[in-house]
Amino acid sequence: MRLFPKSLNLSENVFLLLRDLIHERTGVNYEDSKRDILAEKLLPRVSERGLESFLDYYYLLKYDTSASEEWKHVMDAIAVPETYFWREIDQIHALVNIIVPKYFKKHSEPLRIWSAACSTGEEPLSIAIALNEQNWFWKAPIEIYASDASRSAIAKACSGLYRERSFRALPPNIKEKYFHKENEAWRIAPEIHARIKWQTANLLDESEVRPLAKATVIFCRNVFIYFSEKTIRKTVNLFWECMPNPGYLFLGSSESLLKLNTEFELEEINGSFVYVKNKR
Ligand SMILES: C[S@@+](CC[C@H](N)C(=O)[O-])C[C@H]1O[C@@H](n2cnc3c(N)ncnc32)[C@H](O)[C@@H]1O
């Protein structure tokens, strides 16, 4: 049986090494005041790997042959899977009522939508439900992709089962129509769940982002709050490069690109803010 140390000291020096490495690989930035939080999140991994110090764990992540597998556990450990159905729904209404009809006036090829840090799936499922409510799936070809760096979040999304916490903002009639109770949880209607192509993808991994960022519409909400300006800029510039013209990028309501001088222009569509790529 493995001994599980209740605590290990994460010294300031090792904290700096680990947090820089995590920042470089995942974009997530731990400020000086978050040393204890990072220690708490990584301690179970240090123990699981049978290591005696955070420094050994740093060396494992940096040099060990098993590092790439271990990074998947790091993504799970640092993920903040806070999300719910109908979150910031005005943006989804702007998509369904304005952007989608505008797109199909000019195009017959499929519209691609990507939920880029979808956590356990409530965001892309809300998009699919809202599109279905306006019969869009019968009127035009629409592809929805959803990804997250956390393998356990995507596994939950693939299961299609949700608990009460996810429903705090969903109107009861929509819940009734699209979910059925299964023991203590609720299952999303399989035909809506099947509209979404689920996968893991790290926003800092260019080879994983490039194919997904070809989408006309990207939802990348409530993940940049954990990133540094440097990694937000890097991610957004890659989106810009890969997205078609015009392209629409939705961020969370507390997130902004205004200070970063990117090429996206902020537009108000139907009362919601969206960053638009529109190169004339
Ligand atoms: C708070 S949730 C946001 C969920 C959803 N977009 C929303 O707004 O409700 C943040 C998610 O970002 C994911 N995340 C953090 N760093 C990431 C990265 N480098 N690449 C992809 N996803 C990442 C986390 O795993 C977590 O599931």
Image (cartoon, grey):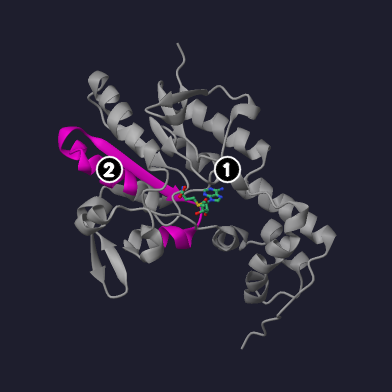
Badge 1, how many Cα within 10 Å: few under 14, some, many 20+? Answer: many
Q: Horizontal and vertical percent for residue 261?
A: 63, 24
Q: In the rendered image, is residue 204 in sight?
A: no
* Image depth: mark 1 or mark 2 in front: 2
- What's the mark number on residue 224? 1
Badge 2, how many Cα within 10 Å: few under 14, some, many 20+? Answer: many
| Residue topped by disc 2 | 130
What residue sits 35% from the left and 38% below the top? 92
What residue sits 36% from the left and 47% below the top? 124
Q: Amino acid at mark 2?
A: Ala
Whether 262 is drawn above or below 139: the answer is above
What residue sits 27% from the left and 63% below the top? 187
Whether 1 is drawn above or below 14: the answer is below
Q: Horizontal and vertical percent for residue 69?
A: 56, 61
Left or right side of 173 for 80:
right
Front-most of residues 54 and 175? 175
Left or right side of 6 for 252:
left
Q: Horizontal and vertical percent for residue 19?
A: 72, 54
Q: In the rendered image, is residue 5 in sight?
A: yes
Which residues are drawn in magenta? Answer: 126-155
Whether 101 is drawn above or below 148: the answer is above
Q: For the N terminus, which image quadrant? A: bottom right
Q: Amino acid at mark 1?
A: Phe
Whether 261 is drawn above or below 177: the answer is above
Q: Horizontal and vertical percent for residue 150?
A: 50, 57
Answer whether residue 139 is magenta in the image.
Answer: yes
Question: Which is nearer the N-term, disc 1 or disc 2?
Answer: 2
